Amino acid sequence: MGRGALLNLRGLGQSLMMLAEATVFLPMTLGRRQRSEVFTQLYVTGIKSLGVITIVAAFTGMILALQTGLELRRFGLQQNIGTAVTVVMLREMGPFMTALIVAASVGSAIAAQVGTMVVSEEISALEIMSINPVRFLVTPRLLALALMMPILTIYTNILGIAGGALVGATQLQVSFQAYIDNAQLYAENKDLYVGLLKAFVFGIVIATTACHQGFIATEGAVGVGQATRRTVIIAFLVILVLGYMLTRLFYR
Amino acid sequence: MIRFENVTKRLGSRNVLDGFDMEVKVGEALVICGPSGMGKSVTLKHMVRLLTPDSGRVMVGDDCVSEARGRELERIRSRFGVLFQSGALLQWLSAGENVALPLREHTNMSDTEIERLAREKLRMVELEDAFDRAPSDLSGGMRKRVALARAIVTNPEIVLYDEPTSGLDPVTSRTVDELIDHLRKQLGITSVVVTHDLHSALAIGDRIAMLHNGKAVEVSAPAEFINSKNEVVRGFLEAQYITRRGPWEEGLQK
Ligand SMILES: Nc1ncnc2c1ncn2[C@@H]1O[C@H](COP(=O)(O)OP(=O)(O)OP(=O)(O)O)[C@@H](O)[C@H]1O
Ligand SMILES: [Mg+2]
C-alpha cells in the first residue's frame, strides 16, 4: 500500500516534469516542420471521438431534461428546465462527458501508440537520432488535446442543450422558444467560460497521463495493454477530482 | 574508435556485461557473435548510450560516451547510424519519410533535396519502389532494409548493425552483406555487426568477437577464428556446420 502510494507520487512527479518539458517545446512545435503534426493530431482527436460524443451529448441533455423536468413538474415549474439543462451542461456535464469520452478513445490510443513505440525500440531510435521524444510526440498531442477539448465541449454543449429542448417540447410541454428564453435568462457567460477552462485542463490531463503511461510501458503486449488501461482509469479519476476542485474554485 | 573499458552492466538478476573489454578499430568491420540473450544488443546499446554502464566506461574516439550529457551526447550520437534489431521504423510515416526523418530534423536542406537523398539510400537497399508504402505493408526483411537506409542516410562515421540479415532470404542476405562491405570499403565507415550467421561474419568481418558470460572470450580475424581452440567458439562453429549439412540429413539420422 505504502509502496503503491510512493509509486503514484513518483508517477505524478514524472508526469509533471514531462508536461513542463513539453511546454518548453511549444514554440518550436509551432514552427514550419512540426506544425503539420499538430494538425494531424487535431484531426485525429476530433474524428476519433466525434461519433460517440454526438450520441452521449444528446442523451446527456435529454436525461437531464427528463429527470429535472419530471421533478420540477410536480411544483409546476417545468418551464425552468431550460436553465437547469443549460447551466449543468455548460458548467459540468459538457466538459466532463467530453473528457471521459476523449480519455477513453483518444487517450487510450495515444498510450497504446507511445507504449508500442517504447517496446519496439522506436523511442530508442528517436533518441539516437537526437530527436527528443517529448518534443516529437508529447508536445503535438498535448497541444492538440488542449485545443480540441474546448472545441469538442462546445459541440457537446450545443447537442446537450438541443437534446434537452427536444425532450422539453415532446414530453414536458415546454415549447422550444420558452426553453431558450428561460435558458438565456439565467445562464451566464461565466458558466460557459468555466466549462471551457475545465475542458482545456482536462485535455492537458489526458495528454499527459496517456503519454506518461505510454513511456513507462514495459516489454510486450501485456505492458501496452496495461498502459492503456491505466491511462483510462487515472485520467477518469483525475478529471473527476480536478473537476470538483475547479467547480469549488469558481462557485462558492 | 570504440573502446569498452572494464564495463559491467547488471540487467534483471545477472551481469549481462561483466568486466567487458573490447575495442573496435577505425575503419574496420567488427562482427559480434554469441548465443541469444548473451548481451550482443546490450553491447551495441552501450555504444550510443541507450544503456549506461554500472561501472567501467565506453569511449568513442576521445569522447567518453558513457559520461556525456546534453549537447555533447547529441554530438557523439550524430557520429553513429544504428540499425535496430526490430527495425524500429515509425509506423505512421511512410518508408521514404522514415528514411528522410534524420535529415528533416537536423538539416536545413530543401524538401526536394531531402527526398532525393532518401530515394538514393532506398535504392541502395533495392527498395526504391517502397518509398510511399507504410512500414506495416512491408515484410519483415523489407522493413529491416528500410531501417538500414535510415541508419546510413546522414552518412555517419560509424554504423551499428543489429542482426541485419536475420529474417532475410539468403539472396537478400548476401545483398545486405555486400552493402555493408561496400559502405565500409568505399566510404571508410567503421562497422559493428551483430549476427548469428557465421557465413556473413566470415565474409564481412575483419575481426570476429565471441561474447560469452559477459566477456569477449575471443576476438580474432576470420582465419584464426575458424581455428580457435576456445570451447564456446568451437561449439558455435560446429552448430553452424551441422545446420549447413541440412535438416534432411538430421532427419535421416533419427
Ligand atoms: N532493458 C532490459 N531490462 C532487463 N533486462 C534486459 C534488458 N535488456 C536486455 N536485458 C537482458 O539482457 C540479456 C541480454 O540481452 P540482449 O538483448 O543483449 O541479447 P542478445 O545477445 O542481443 O540476444 P538476441 O540474439 O536474442 O538478440 C538478456 O538476458 C535480456 O533478458
Ligand atoms: Mg539482440
Image: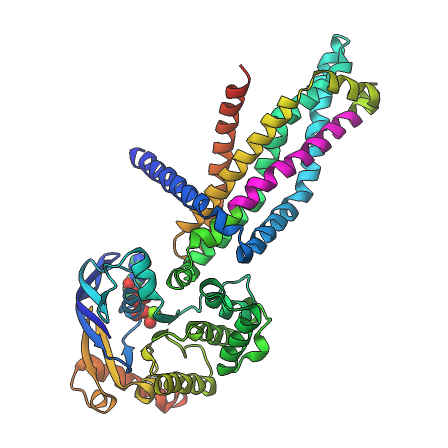
Which is more toward the observer, A236 or A177?
A177
Magenta-span inclusion, residue A146: yes
Farthest residue, direction top: A75
Q: In this view, does B16 lie above or below A95?
A: below
Whether residue A248 appears in magenta in the rendering, the answer is no
Q: In this view, does A121 lie to the left or right of B30?
A: right
Q: How is the image coloured?
A: rainbow
Q: What stretch is highlighted in magenta?
A: A142-166
Magenta-drawn stretch, dominant element (helix, strand or loop): helix
Q: Quadrant of ligand 2?
A: bottom left
- Does the image show residue A111? no
Q: Quadrant of residue A83?
A: top right
Give the quarter of the figure containing the N terminus of chain A: top left
Tally of marks: 0
Q: Residue A64's x, y, as percent?
A: 69, 24
Q: Residue at x 16, y 82 (%)?
A: B230
Residue A107: x and y, percent?
A: 53, 44
* Residue drawn 31% across the image and 55% down it: B70
Measured as percent of width and height from the top left, residue A57 is found at 68, 34
Q: Which one is nearer the viewer's eye here, B185 or A70?
A: B185
Residue A157 pos. (x, y %): 68, 31
Question: Where, by quadrant of the figure, is residue B202 drawn?
Answer: bottom left
Instruction: Determine if residue A77 is in view.
Output: yes
Front one among B64 and A66: B64
